[in-house]
Image (tube, rainbow, N blue to C red):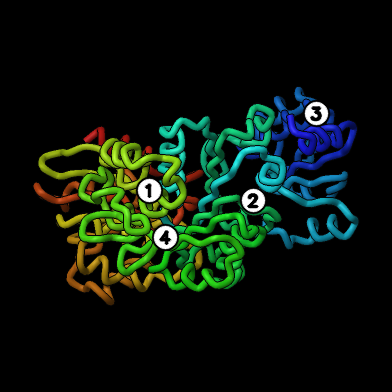
Amino acid sequence: MNKKLKAWKQSLHHKPVCVVGIGISHLPLIEYLVAQGAIVTACDKRTESELGETAHKLREMGARLELGDGYLSHLSGDVIFKTPGLRPDVPALLDAKGQGILVTSEMDVFMDLCPAPVTAITGSDGKTTTTTLIYKLLKAAGFKTRVGGNIGAPLLPVIDSIAESDRVVLELSSFQLQTMTHSPQTAVITNITPNHLDYHRDYAEYIAAKQNILQYQTGENLAILNLDNDITRGMISETKGKVLTFSRKQEADICLKGTEIVYKGEPILDVRTIKIPGNHNIENYMASIGAVYPEASVAKIQNCAAEFGGVAHRIEFVREVEGVRYYNSSIDSSPNRTINTLSVFSEPVVLIAGGKDKGIPYDELGPAIRDHVKCLVLIGATANTIAQVSKKAAPDVPVVFATSYDDAVLKAKEAATSGDVVLLSNASTSFDLFKNFEERGNLFKELVNRL
């Protein structure tokens, strides 16, 4: 155990600590803090009855609970671990800071204490696939590799088992990055487009949160940036570390020469061998190659491209019924993601879309509907917004409204004929009807498998 980690663990003995938000990721954190001798108060806006068995489990651990509407009323202690979904400028947190309490997060503390090199990935689209690719390629190269952040399990509770020779790969959201005070040794930004404007005050704040992944890098660190994206291209001159650029459309450190991805002129991967479809996945491979090559060899990269079938809920093939292919892309929680997904298909698409509004414009979705969609099946809070956009750009595309997901799948089946694709790609978040996009995608797959 390194000295810094040992000292931090010792500092927790008999010290009062608050953990705000009792989600899946914070339960192992609370258990870990209690095991270090901290006096833990767990705070959550849900009531005891809503938490159910979780509340009982936390009390058995020895944690004190602050629940319900007033869960932020009594924040105190030496340290507060904030859930990423809570804005850092809520009055209770600002008051705590004013009292000298350290407000931090599980991820920020982990980044400070982690003994192994960290590669972190952010972006509006593609970050989960890129994170998964980097993780798989580093494992294939022989490194003991951990994955965390937005995916995988919380890493701070297992930090004792991470060695300097290991590798850590993190997917980081704008929520996590907004308050980060540490940067990874290797930072990847896939792209930046308007997103999460229901949380961020404006697009500028969202961009600043993403850019914070670079803020604390040094000259020895590496930033991998998308040259085809206006926002990330503009970050190049402000980056403190070394920079690798990637581009599908122009000359860059990692770019296309014919059908070949080349790294500084060296051929690495023929894009025709990539198993997962779409130009956006070519870009994901470019970013991943920048992060792992030459530690992961050309042969390892080529093997991964030929074998990796993608991450669940991302253009995931479900089944074929009567000549119609059904795909689940429930991860598509923004118009830009749905635009990218639609571009993958040359077949006529029956599109199921709609969900909770994130406060972002939908206008650019219209041309993609016009070019790819034969029928639009809408459900959820953004159904009317998407219908209006479609009517303006693609007035000839029929629009059908569904009252449930059972109804949506049946109406999509009725609209599709042999050779078509039925695609779930919501262009909106899942939180109007579901806990998360996984639950939404799983229900879609279940309904399709019943057909």
Can the viewer see residue 64 in this picture? no
What number is the disc on residue 36? 3
Query: How busy is the neighbourhood of tag 1: few (under 14 within 10 Å), some, or many (20 plus)?
Result: many
Residue 333 horizontal side relative to residue 61, left or right: left
Mark 3–mark 4 Cα distance, whole angstroms, equals: 41 Å
Residue 226 horizontal side relative to residue 9, left or right: left
**Position of residue 275 measured from the top left corner of the image (x, y, whole percent):** 25, 43
Q: How many marks?
A: 4
Name which residue type carries label 4.
Ser
Q: Residue furthest front?
A: 265
346 or 137: nearer the eye? 137
Mark 2–mark 4 Cα distance, whole angstroms, equals: 19 Å
Can the viewer see residue 20 in this picture? yes
Query: How busy is the neighbourhood of tag 4: few (under 14 within 10 Å), some, or many (20 plus)?
Result: many
Does dot 1 land on a helix, a strand or a loop? loop
Lower position in the chain sequence, tag 3 or tag 1: 3
What number is the disc on residue 334? 4
Lower position in the chain sequence, tag 2 or tag 1: 2
Name which residue type carries label 2.
Pro
Does dot 2 land on a helix, a strand or a loop? loop
Q: Quadrant of the C terminus?
A: top left
Residue located 57% across and 58% down the image:
174
Does dot 4 land on a helix, a strand or a loop? loop
**Position of residue 315 measured from the top left corner of the image (x, y, whole percent):** 30, 47
What number is the disc on residue 356? none
Name which residue type carries label 1.
Ser
The residue singled out by tag 1 in the image is 330
Is disc 3 in contact with disc 1, using a CB cutoff of under 8 Å? Answer: no
Mark 3–mark 1 Cα distance, whole angstroms, equals: 39 Å
The residue singled out by tag 2 in the image is 84
Mark 2–mark 3 Cα distance, whole angstroms, equals: 23 Å
